[in-house]
Structure formats: C-alpha cells, structure tokens
Amino acid sequence: MTSTGAATEPSERAVRWSYMDHWRSAGPAGPIDQWHDRESMSTFLKQIKAVGFDAIDTFDFRFWQILGDYGSVAAYQDFVQQHGLERIVNTFHAADYDLRRYAPHVPETHATILEDFRVTMDRWSGIQLDNIIVMPATLYYDMEPVTADKIKTTAELWNRVGEITLQWGVQLTCHHEFFCGIQSRSDLDLFYASTDPRYVNLFVDTAQHCIASVDPVDFYRAYADRVTGFHFKDTHHVDRSGDHRHRPDAEIMAPTTAKWFYEMGTDEGLVDFEAMMRAIRDQQYRGWITVEHDKANKLGGDYAESTAISRWYADNVLAGIYR
Amino acid sequence: MTIRWGYSLDQWKPQFDDFVRRRDHERALKTVAVAGFAGIQVSSGTGRWEPTGNPAQIAANFGSVHGLSEVVRACALDGLAAFAVDLGAAYHEDLQGTADPRKAADHDTLLARAVWFADTMAGTGCRILAVRPAPSGAAGAADDDGIASMVAGWNAVGAATAERGVRTVIRFDFLTSLRLNDGWRRLTDAVDPAVVGIAINTGELAAAGTDPFAELSRLAARVEHVVLSNALCEDDSAEFTRPGAEFSVRRSGGQRRVPRWFGELEQPGLVDAEQVVRALVDLDYDGWVIVDTAPSPHPATSALLSGYHVQRVLDPLTRRTT
C-alpha cells in the first residue's frame, strides 16, 4: 500500500462481508482456536480485519466462553469492534440433534426445542443480530426415510421458532448441510412450500448445496425473496455415493472424501461464484455475505491462508460484478 | 516523502524444496496483496527449485522477469520492489563457486552476477538490488585491505548496475562477518554514496546487538531501502561465527535453540517499529519499506498480522499533519 482507507465506504456498498469464525492456529503445544484466551481472539480478529472483512459471524454455543472471558455478549462485541470490525452479524445455532429429545421431525421434542430458542434469544439479546442460523433437520440417517409428513412436521416447528426469534428482531434462517435430512432439491422445495415466509428464511451455503447436487445459483434465484444470507464456500467434490447417509458422521468421516470444504478461489472449486454474484446483483440483494471455510486446516490447510485467498477472490473477482 | 509498503517472500521458503510450484507463489502473493501490501521483495537462489531465485530460473519459469511481474500484478500487487541477493554464493547457473568480496580476484564474478541481475531487472520498475556485502562470520574479520577490496568491488558493482537503472544497496544481516572488528561501519563509511546506497534491516541489526534506530540516524539520507523486521532475540554469544550459521543458527536456533530470531512487528521484541517509522518520516524517506517476518512457522498468519499492524498503526504515522 502507499495509502490506506481508499476502499469504498461500507455504507456505499450493497454487499458487506462477514467471516464465519472457524479458526485454528498453532499454539506452543499444538493447534488452538481463538476462544482459548483473549490474546488468541485478538490475533484472530486482527487477521480478519487485515484482509478487509467488515464483521464476523459466530456460533451461539460460545455463550459460556463469552461469559467467562468477556463478561457478556455485548462486551465480546465491544472487543470485536476494538479491532476495527463493525459487529457480530449472525449466529449459528448448532444444535445437538437427538431423536429422543431434539429432532425437528419428531413432534414430541418440539417443546424442548422451542424453549431452547427462548433461552438462546434471551442470552443473545445484548446485541442486535440479523439472523440465527439453523440446520433445520436432523442428520440424514436419523430422518430417513424422508417423507412429506416429516418435512411438514419439521416446517411447523420452524414456523413457531421463527415467530419466537422475531420477537427479538432476529430472523430465523435455514442452512441445509449436505448431510442433513432436508437437502435434495425436491425436499427443499417442499420444505419452503410448507414454511411461512414471514418466519422461515433461507441461508444459502454454496458448497453444501453443490455437494448435494443442488445448483446453488438456480436455488438462490428460485428463493431470492426468502434469502437472508449466504455462506460463500467451495467444494472440490460432489456426493455421488451416498456419503450424506454415512454413519456415524459424513462431514469429516465420509470414506470417499477427507475434506469437503475449501475456500473460494481455488482452481478445483466446483461452485460458480461469479454466476452466484451475478444472480445476487440481478436480485439487487443488499446485505451481508459471509465467507466460510470450515475444516480448512484438514489435509495440511491453513486457516489464515484460506481466509486471505477467499477474501482476495471476493475483492478482486466478485467485487467487479457487484459490490 | 512517500513510503510504499512491501513484504518479503522469504518466510514462505524455509527449505530449498519448498515454495516451488506456481500455486504456492500465487497463494502467497494474494495473501500479501489482500493484507494491504503493494510490492514484494524476493531473494536470490540457485537451481531449478528456486523459480524466482535468479534470471535463468525466472526465464525458465516465467519466460522473463516481465512474465514474473505479470504474475505478481495479476495477484493485485504493483510489482517487484527489490531483489535481495547474495552474489557471493555459488550459482549452478554460471558454474562458478562462491565469490568473496574481500578478494579482488573474485570481483569479476561478483560484477558479472550483478550485471546479470540488473539486466533482468531493467525496465520492470524494480530498481533496488540489495547485495550481501560480506560472507558470514566464520570467514573472520576483514582487515584494512579486505575492507578496501570490498569497497572497490561494491563501488564497481554499483556503477555497473546504475548504468542499467538499478541501484545497488548493501545490506546488513546478523550473521555477517562485518560484525567483527567494526566492519559494517568501516564499510559504510568508505563506499561511494554516489553509486552504493544503504539498506537498513532493523531486525537483523537488533539481533546483532546494534540499535537500528541509531543506525538509521547515522546513515540518514544514505538509506535507500528499508526492511522492517523485529528481532525477538540477540545473538550475544558470537554464534554468527559458527560454520554454516545460515542453517545452524538462523534456521535451527543455534546452541540455545532460539525458537524464532524474528517475529511479527507487534510482538514484544528488540525493534520499536513505530519509532523507526517516525524516524523515516523525519528523514523524508522516499522508498519501499519491506516487512519481513522470516523465518516464520506460520507465514500467512505473519503476513496478516503484519498487514493489520501496518494498516492500523504504522501507516497512519506517515500521514501526520504539518
């Protein structure tokens, strides 16, 4: 640089960029994540800011670590802001699905789930989130056979959850992992036909849909008016052999694929991000795009490098299409 | 006064068989660019696993230095800022062995290599050839004749590269034999400023027990290239005089097994980067400041933390109102 601060002001941009806070770095005794202590968090946030992200997303299961290290969610957001980042935009509600007590297609578990969201929204009420993101179904093998009735039961639950989150001014939005029970295009269509657009939104994860053989661009165009955010991440593999059903886990333990997710900007990437950006431009989307590359450290990867490469791609390729 | 911020690629190449493939280069360049830097400094090397190490390898891998520059620019950087070279090392490409700047008989080899680099750099916008002026400490101290020979040799090199639009600057490193018998000061006092400039490397000076701020003040307007690095530890037991110190000391940490001689600028260390930048502003310095964190166990993290520190702390210091 010969100068700084020449970038377009955030308020002038239709799109602002957030980073989903997966991270690992090298500690003296092996890998650590940024939640180990405030210094680790500061080091993480500096790197996110350095490459030009505007904000971060997080997981709400971090609540107890936040209380312990920062005192409150608001105080943690203050810490984020001290590093030049705007705020925390979204939180991901990574539920521990269990057919006995927490499964969206099992009506007997709904009361527990609804109470979980009342508690969660209250815990995070110290800051203003845009979205709370959920995987709206259990693991695929816990839901199969995936039937219309199960999908409609699931939809009924999320309509009620969305009504709750809106009471805190937060949108409920659904993120369909390739290994979750609602991931094929036909099941996605039925799910969105069965949910109330006032309460249930869509969060497009480009890699997850691509792995599940759902064209994320086409899917986005079909539901653009319900989309409240994106995970821009890539994959090098499509699930062609039923890995999404693999027990006990498909995300890290699938026999065919040791690493499903990659950062934007690799030659082998299967997601057409330029087409995605053109679609977003055509829809005149205004809001946040979140960059994600969970498990980036697998197979010798490096979070800092993957984050730099993806942000470089957003800045040097995608911003030329829409910003 | 204009400071342009660049980054050294050295940290991406811990061993000779690392950082060889184009993909590695492009990912490093993009990382440097998105961290906010405008240019890069590359170092010399020899052999087919050194794609950016010398003109022959650059031609073999990129067609020409212009081809390398295109790759750099395609990664959203302005270009090459500087070549840091050791013209005294052995090069397979010219079938010549090591050359000692203290020996007049070796000067033709040094001169030919300098011209080799300068001819390649000409027209690329990269005009700084930062040469290592003396061998490592195991070679022993230079006597008066040795200093005089070095002065003659580097003056000749400087004059030859100047004809090609390339400025020769001599650079200090903490393993240099110039630490002995006050060699660095004697050499910098004696070279001709008309043809030979000075490169300050803050961390290398500090690791050698020399105050970089004082050195910057002493050399002042003669400083034409700056490498801003932070030393975490000082070699205060003459480890630089050990044979093979480039490997046994710089890479392996020496007898104390120092984990890192050099760290990020923000780390508690021996260099006050803010003080250095303020001094450069006071000197009305006009040129590149190359941030260098090599060797680093985590190159991308080092680059991003450096970018943050430059953007948020150091670069604002260059914008003071008068």
Image (spheres, rainbow, N blue to C red):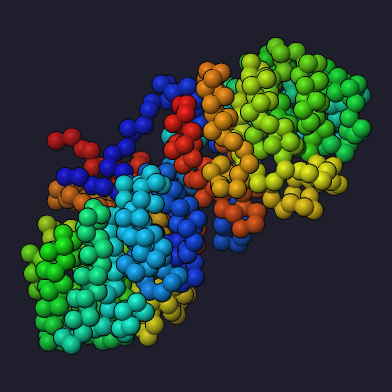
Residue at 65% x, 57% y is A299
Q: Quadrant of residue B225?
A: bottom left
Residue at 45% x, 70% y is B49
Q: Quadrant of residue A121?
A: top right
Above or below B98: residue A301: above
Q: Residue A36: image x %, image y %?
A: 60, 48
Q: Quadrant of the N terminus of chain B?
A: top left
Residue at 24% x, 83% y is B100
Q: Residue B82: image x %, image y %?
A: 27, 59
Query: Considering depth in this image, is B73 or B173 the residue closer to the camera?
Result: B73
Q: Quadrant of residue B258?
A: bottom left
Q: Is residue B322 left or right of residue A36?
A: left
Query: Considering depth in this image, is B120 or A313 the residue closer to the camera?
Result: B120
Query: Considering depth in this image, is A185 or A244 the residue closer to the camera?
Result: A185
Total numbered labels placed on residues in the image: 0
Q: Is residue A271 left or right of residue B199?
A: right
Q: Quadrant of the C terminus of chain B?
A: top left
Above or below A290: residue B5: below
Q: Residue A83: image x %, image y %?
A: 45, 37
Task: State whether residue A170 appears in this view.
Answer: no
* Residue sitting at the far front: B63
Task: State whether residue B98 appears in this view.
Answer: yes
Above or below A55: residue A128: above
Residue at 53% x, 43% y is A265
Q: Residue A12: image x %, image y %?
A: 41, 21
